[in-house]
Amino acid sequence: MSQDELARFIEAKATELGVPGVSVGIWTGNRETFASHGVTSIDTPVPVREDTLFLVGSVSKSFTATALMRLVADGHVELDAPVRRYVPELKLADERTAAEITVLQLLNHTAGLDWRFGAETGEGDDALAAYVARLEESELIGPPGGRSSYSQTGYNLAGRIIENVTRLPFEEAVSRLLFEPLGMSRTTYSLDAALALGCSASHHREEDGTLSALAPWKESRANNAGGGALASMDDLMRWARFHLWLGRSDCGARVMPPQVMHRMQQPTVELRGTSLGDAMGIGWFLRDTDGVRVVEHGGSASGQFAELVLVPERDFAVVVASNEGPDSGLALNRAVVRWALEHYLGVIDRDPEPLPHDPARARELVGEYANEMMTITVDAETSGLTIACAIKPELRAASDAEMPADLPAAGLGLLPGDGDEYIVTGGGLQGQRGFFTRDDSGAITGADLGGRLFTRVGAAPAA
């Protein structure tokens, strides 16, 4: 494929979806290709380029996991050791859980920690330490090792391991361990530094469809390990090659042992009913698509989305970052990844087909489900099930930052099988998969979406 063909597709798709700016990088056959379209902000329209920084959200978790694995390779950390060996100050709501959680369980989301813990602890070098000191207030969703549930909290705690072992602030430690040896000079956790280098703004749409640029904003410093990095497309391509080449930098230097890098791409726990993947490695989601193994991680921030996808057996990577919220940014990134897999590798990635609507089965799923940050509402109409997602109103009221709009009700279809799995069939989350959970009596007790558990808080209406 030529750079012109890639650029034409990106321009057409971004225009169709109304996304202000997007940057894409492709690595295949020892060749690097970039294409960008649009502007960093509709208010101050600077063209997007491959050196424009984007908020990459949870792609940051691949940085954190790899930095921790470098400490494993150097003999400073053991994956199966309890977290308290490295974070002796850790306290949780349940003492047994605090004592038993292992390092690996943080990295593969099986520690039993909730998705998010919303503690604001400032921007000083003690931000992460202060965050961990408050984890006794956070909720637990189950025993360590019991199930996989995506957890920002767990990765922030992993960041504290890095701080304690290296005796450096998290950001400085990751820079020394990874960014500096890899030449990633346009990757940072500092918004001020990103703005100086040239950073994209975020955008979201109002209910009337009006697009607006958000004021520059990122989450508090204590969340850097789980989702606070900003990076340019050319740096993300360096990062992709580092993992494709199992620990070698662009200049050929051996930064990490290949066996450690290879282990990160091997399954550690199976995943159920999620578009994130079939299994979790260490810092990576893994899935088999049309006969090839895909290694990937996505990231969302306020009004920005990123996706990093590797196909190691084909020495292939596609990375995309866009600057609009879930109404269009997520859809654009997903379309770019699928187009690249098909046109460069001949790999077809399709959504499964949902079952016809079953009113009787749908009624027992209706209700409200919540975790610490968000709610999802499942409703049944004559034509089928719907799902709506919203940030909790009390969190909106407590935040000074502009938050993205809630996602209105969109179609939801159940998938074949007896596992209560589903797929979102419309709206900003189209293609996202999840499943409902039941207790021993068969009653619905929760729903997973995007790998995150939402506990049922509103029962189904009486028949």
Image (cartoon, helix red, strand yellow):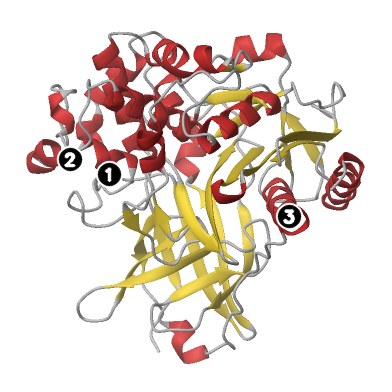
Mark seen at residue 335 = 3
CB atoms at circles 2 and 1 under 8 Å apart? yes
In the picture, measured across the screen, residue 421 lies left or right of residue 93, that is right
Residue type indicated by callout 1: Leu
215 or 312: nearer the viewer: 312
Give the CA distance from mark 3 to mark 1: 32 Å
Q: Secondary structure at mark 3?
A: helix
**Residue 446 drawn above or below residue 247:** below
Mark 1 nearby-residue class (10 Å; few <14, some 14–19, many ≥20)? many
Where residue 161 sits, quadrant-wise, is top left
Residue found at x 80% / y 50%: 208
Picture quarter containing residue 127? top left
Quarter holding residue 121: top left
The C terminus lies in quadrant: bottom left
Q: Which element is circle 2 on?
A: loop
Residue for badge 1: 113
Marks 3 and 1, the one that precedes in the sequence = 1
Tell me if residue 328 comes above or below residue 436 in the rendering. above
The label shown at residue 243 is none
Which is more N-terminal, label 1 or label 2?
2
Question: Is residue 218 among the parts visible in the rendering?
Answer: no
- What kind of residue is marked 3? Ala
Q: Which residue is mark 2?
A: 101
> Looking at the picture, how far across and down is residue 154, in whole percent?
32, 37
Q: Position of residue 78 (x, y in %)?
A: 20, 31
User: Which residue is at 17% across, 52% downward?
Assistant: 143
* Residue under the point 52% across and 89% down: 359
- Whether residue 64 is visible: yes
Q: Secondary structure at mark 1?
A: loop
Distance, label 3 to label 2, CA atoms, is 38 Å
Q: Amino acid at mark 2?
A: Ile
Residue at 63 percent of width and 39 percent of height: 306
